Amino acid sequence: MDLQRTEEETVEEIKKWWRENGTAVFIGLAIGISVIVGVRYWGEYQQSQAQKASEIYNVVNEAIASKNYDVVFAQGQTLINDYSRTPYAPLAALIMAKAKFEKNNLTGAQLHLGWVIDHASDKGVQHIARIRLARLLLDNKDYVGAMKVIDGQGDSAFKSVYDELRGDIAAAQGNMAQARDAWLLALAATDIDPNRKQIIQIKLDDAAISKTASTPATATK
Amino acid sequence: MLQLIRDRAQGVLIWTIVGLIIITFALFGLSSYLSGSSTNYVASVNSVEIKEPEFRRETQRIEQKLGKEYRPEFSRFVKAQAIDRLVMRELLNQYQKDERFYVSDSSVLSELNKDESFKGTDGKFDSVRYREILSQSGMSPAMYEQEIGFLLAKSYLESGITRSEFTTASEVDNLRRLRNQQRDMGYLVINRSEYLKTAQASSQEVEAYYNDHRQEFMNPEQVRVEYVELKLEEMAARYPVSEQDIEKKYQAERNSYVINKEQRRAGHILIIVDKKTTEEAAKQKIAGILKEVKAGKDFAKLAKQHSQDPGSAKKGGDLGFFGRNVMDKAFEESAFSLKKGSVSEPVRSKYGYHLIKLTDIKPEKVKPLQAVREQIKKSLQIQQAQSDFGTDTSKLDLLSFEKPDSLSPVVEELGLTIKTSGFFTRQGGTGIAADPRVVQAAFSEEVLTGGKNSKMLELGEHALVLRIKEHKPASQRSLQEVTPLLQTRLKTQAAAAMVKETSDKVLARLQGGESPEQVVKSIKGAKWVKTGPIFRSAELDTVPLAKQVPHEIRRFGFTLPKPDAGKTSWGNTATGTGDGVVVGLFAVQVSDTKADKAKQQQEVLALTNFQGRAMLDHLLKQLHKDAKISINLPKDE
């Protein structure tokens, strides 16, 4: 660089740089600021949406406790229509499914549970909906459908629940060997509640399979 | 100046940096720069750290909850629980943020309005009171409201999951069928004790077993220590105490030896001073009554006639016994200065004018000096010994440390005697070895292998220095020594094998179609028992005989495969006490009577609650599973 430049030259250079890049800087700043404002605004908008949703949800939640089904359906539908991206919509849908179940409307209950599986952002809530849907189908003797709903649901904190359910479905189909295997898997889970363990053990005991006469049936333990 | 401008103008890079800084501040605010990690963290949840002070508060909270139940041994569990809670809380906190579980300000407000402790005297929310209560626990309203919001969102999630749970008809039916199932069984028990009688263990077998399990048969390492000790109480006994000193202390502390304070019984006549009766009128009236008393009229009769204290007037003015600090001050002064049987001059209390007649005195009862003499003497001695005990223990501490190879220097200097303990192991022993601090010192590196004096142990008002007198390392127990033990063990094993063999043979015979009544005759001490139909749980059984079926046998019978019609399903097992059991299952029946409506509803409700809680539990476990959690518990002090 030229070390002999005078001040005038330098000022001239700055002016030149500014003529060439000024617009770009302005546009850059404008974009930057509007992005910041936009992000903030979006965050606040979502927060206020969720807050409104929480109040509607509270109404649904109270209504199911007092079996006020009309309110459950009306307010729940509002959440699903207008606030589907808040966490309150899937919870309300779970509650609506329960209300439909209590009114013996199994198709309706299934639809709501299906909606939760597709729309809940939390995996745990999805699992719960999936398990409940499979249980409804099992109760309705739709064994293939029930199995399909829980198919491939392996590695999660709900594994033991899925295993037990697989056993229940197999047992309902009369497939006792398969049922026993599934229940044994469920029992092997370390995080299992003692009450649930007891129930599975009873089902397992009851499904004991007769061995051939040549091998004496000694107890495993 | 210009140099600066030139530098700036040169770098688009610098503009970019400035821009980035602006954006970060705008997005995250200053706080992300200010909250440095200065304290240690005990856990990190998705790189959010839980700090030590927070952890300490939580452990304290748990300890407080345990209250009197708390013991230092629980420390590990308390810490683990505190960590679990804090991690769970942080997980939920992050979950609420990620999922946008926001709650509205008005619902937070209505929670505050519900809280009784924030209500003022008019029963409404009192904001001054609210701030006061919060500041007592060092919280700002913003912090507290955030906490309420957190709890509210948590309850929204919980109730959403649990209230939406259901139980299907087939689920209730299946469970009821299992519970109401009855099984008709028979069993025979093969007693191990019968086989123990004839079981043998040859000396060769014992020796072989001994050689295979040598390391099981060791004498534990033991030591015997010699020690010197200083006991405050023992030292104190040597100090003379004069009778005068005891007497002086007794007098000084007399109040603490009082068993019953003085009580007096009095009657009174009251003339009330109030709006209707002026001071002057009352005074005159009471003076008139006093005259009558002095003239010899009966006090009780006068009280009945004149006293305006209706309760006592009926009883002739009698107030019964009372101590000091019960009555009006002026009344008390007078009552406690009268002689028995005399009547006071008019006394003005806050009620009006009284005449008081003292009728009885129960004098103060004090423990006599004789009863507390020893106690006082001891405490005087201890007072005197305290400073000498202090000097002697510091001498003991210093000397035993400076001359660590023997106890004789301290013995000479302090005039102590060397005592010797019995043998004890690392698990402790009797006498001084019952104290774990003594055991720890005796087995410490320095004392055990270094052969030095221990540090002075301070066991309350008892100081002790020890050194090893004798050390027995762990040693092999001889074959001879353990033979009786091994014989029992091997015989038990042999008996168990015979039981198993018999049990298997019996099972095979029964499966082959022989009748149990026939088979049982060939087994020593065995009995064939038919249970009749029994339930899975003895609680449901009503027939006494069915109730008595041992739990293990009942349980085993319910694991047997169901028999084909007319056949028997046989199986065998061993009980916890080593007896063999052969069980036959004849029939399985279900009393399929529908439960009554109320009971069924109850069952459904219980199952639904249980299932709902389970779902919530698994949801939280899922959060745990998906998070990156590292625990960094501080080491124990």
Image (cartoon, rainbow, N blue to C red):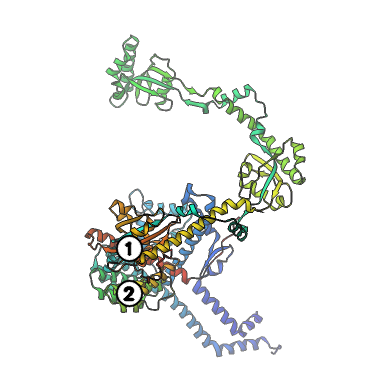
Q: Which of the 4 image quadrants contains residue B280?
A: top left
- Residue named by callout 1: B585
Where residue B615 appears, as percent x and y from the top left, is 37, 67
Q: Which residue is found at the position 22% from the left and 59% from the top?
A: B596
Tell me the SS state at disc 2. helix
Where residue B473 appears, as percent x and y from the top left, is 68, 52
Is disc 1 in contact with disc 2, using a CB cutoff of under 8 Å?
Answer: no
Q: Nearer the viewer, residue A6 or B102?
A: B102
Asked whether the viewer can see residue B145, the reply is no
Q: Quadrant of the C terminus of chain B?
A: bottom right
The amino acid type, in three-letter code, at marker 1 is Leu
Number of other residues with Cα within 10 Å of mark 2, as a class: few under 14, some 14 to 19, many 20 or more: many
Q: Which residue is found at the position 45% from the left and 20% from the top?
A: B363
Where residue B315 appears, as percent x and y from the top left, is 30, 20
Q: Nearer the viewer, residue B484 or B5?
A: B484
The amino acid type, in three-letter code, at marker 2 is Ala
Where residue B166 appears, as percent x and y from the top left, is 30, 67
Q: Which of the 4 image quadrants contains residue B303?
A: top left
Q: Give the vertical position of A91 relative to A2 (above or below).
A: above
Distance of label 1 from label 2 (alpha carbons): 35 Å
Q: Give the vertical position of B494 relative to B344 (above or below).
A: below
Mark 2, chain letter? A
Asked whether the viewer can see residue B470, the reply is yes
Are labels 1 and 2 assigned to the same chain? no
Mark 1, chain letter? B
Q: Does residue B302 appear to the left or right of B73 in the view shown?
A: left
Q: Which residue is found at the position 46% from the left and 64% from the top?
A: B88
Nearer the camera: disc 1 or disc 2: 1
Q: Give the vertical position of A30 relative to B404 (above or below).
A: below
Number of other residues with Cα within 10 Å of mark 1, as a class: few under 14, some 14 to 19, many 20 or more: many
Mark identifier at residue A134: 2
